[in-house]
Amino acid sequence: MYELRELRKVFADGTAAIDGISLTVGRGEHVAVIGPSGAGKTTLFRMLNLTLRPTSGTIRFDGADITSMKERDLRPIRKGMQIIFQDPHASLNPAMSIGESIADPLRIHGDATEAEAKDAALVIMKEVGLSPPEQMFAKYPSELSGGQKQRAVIARAMILRPKLIVADEPVAMLDMSIRAKILELMLELKDRHGLTYLFITHDLATAKFICDRIAIMYLGRIVEVGDAKAIYRDPKHPYTRALLGAIPIPDPDARRFKTLPKGEIPDAAYPPAGCRFHPRCPVATPACGWEPQDVLDYLDQRSLDDAARRADEEILGPRELMEPDGPTLRIRVAKRSMGLSRREKRRSAIAVVVAGLLFAALSPIVGAGLVASGLVSVLAVDALARREAFRRGRRPDPEKVRSHLADILGKAPEPLRQSVRRLATTADEVLVEFAPTEDPGLRTAEEREVRCVLY
Ligand code: ADP
């Protein structure tokens, strides 16, 4: 009924917020897409309601390719596919009564007279629990509670008798006590009208309550998708396991991760290679996609320890000398730094002369004095820098850098250490080489598909 094929959305800054999502929602199915913040949920939702067009891939609704359909052609399709937004307060026009808002889609689609639209609104209001409907009809959003507003939003979506409801966190902004009631209402409606639901949420509990299939997203990709019961009972992807482990469960013997994975979710603009979860994964293997960035991250982690940071800075030099180049990390070995570079000297001299000329307009003597003293200062700084360089004995010594790196990598987590294919030196570089890696892709495993090399 609703089919997403290899959807991608790349923003102007190069961020691939959605990076190859395929998902099919069959008629009568209730599917949730679950992901942490930054996973790309909002971007996906905007593409699903066609307010944001994908960079590539296709969206089909009832067999029709609607990916790049014009708004005019989409209108009849929008009737069958209604959207529920997260924020019920922002979804209702404050200047319209609740009844008018609910009846409005019928008027927009030109399918009913005023009287018919009002009657239909009263019927649906009763069905969603906005009672007594005749009284509620004339109320304004400001007079309603959060739960009542969300009921009104649901009624407005239902009035066109859609087949598919796409909902973005439909209960996230409601009080805990009201959430269950709204979800129950959504369950009743789906049973009564044979609705198909596609939920987007960060909340596993909501998804469990209402959905029979779930897709777990991480950094723009689906990492596990399949039967909800199977996944809740026995999550396979380490990220899903971590996510489910973070929900309190009554069975103390169940094997779950106790804590959420280490570290932050990486920036989607620079996603990790291979499996995007590998830097945080507690069961990562050398085959999971280790890359130069992981070495840089490990150096960052080491720098929290003062002694390690000083040693690394002294021997490896500053971060500007380290550059990922595909599967290779190139570390330029600091050249013998003998004072200021030619460019630095030239720039300083120009700055001094310009300042001198400005002052020369006031007094030629002051100007000349300034130029002379400025040039002497540049030479003095250069001499001091040469002395400092000499004192530190910074000669290019790739071998020393290589052996320090070998020491560091020896202490790195095992999968990272084992995935380094070679440490090599050239005249002025040390190279840390990894095998090129690929995303493992979705693999079939027990009633679901999972994107992990362990399966
Ligand atoms: P979620 O809703 O799951 O938190 P989003 O879809 O909002 O995720 O964002 C996914 C990633 O895409 C984030 O890294 C975000 O910074 C980036 N992103 C979202 N919108 C834009 C945009 N307009 N331009 C550039 N990057 C964006």
Image (cartoon, helix red, strand yellow):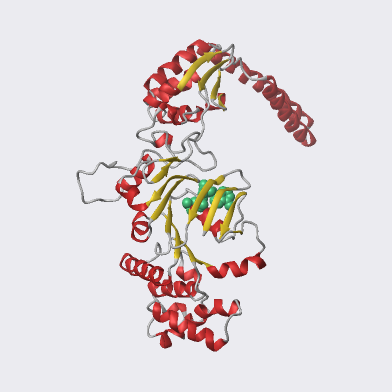
Question: In which quadrant of the rendered view does residue 299 lie?
Answer: top left
264 w.r.t. 370: above or below: below
* Residue 23 visible in the picture: yes
Pick the front one: 431 or 316 = 431
| Residue beneath the point at 79% across and 30% down | 364
270 w.r.t. 312: above or below: below
Question: In which quadrant of the rendered view does residue 114 lie?
Answer: bottom right
| Residue beneath the point at 32% across and 66% down | 180
Tally of numbered tags: 0
Q: Give residue 1's position: percent from left, percent from top.
A: 51, 60
Question: Is 210 positioned to the left or the right of 430 in the image?
Answer: left
Q: Give residue 445's position: percent from left, percent from top.
A: 39, 41
Pick the front one: 118 or 325 = 118
Residue reaching furthest left?
Answer: 252
| Residue beneath the point at 49% across and 34% down | 274
* Residue 393 visible in the picture: no
376 w.r.t. 79: above or below: above
| Residue beneath the point at 47% across and 35% down | 440
Q: Give residue 356's position: percent from left, percent from top.
A: 74, 30
Q: Give residue 45's position: percent from left, percent from top.
A: 52, 57
Pick the front one: 402 or 261 = 261
Pick the quarter of the image with the C terminus: top left
Question: In which quadrant of the rendered view does residue 236 lie?
Answer: top left
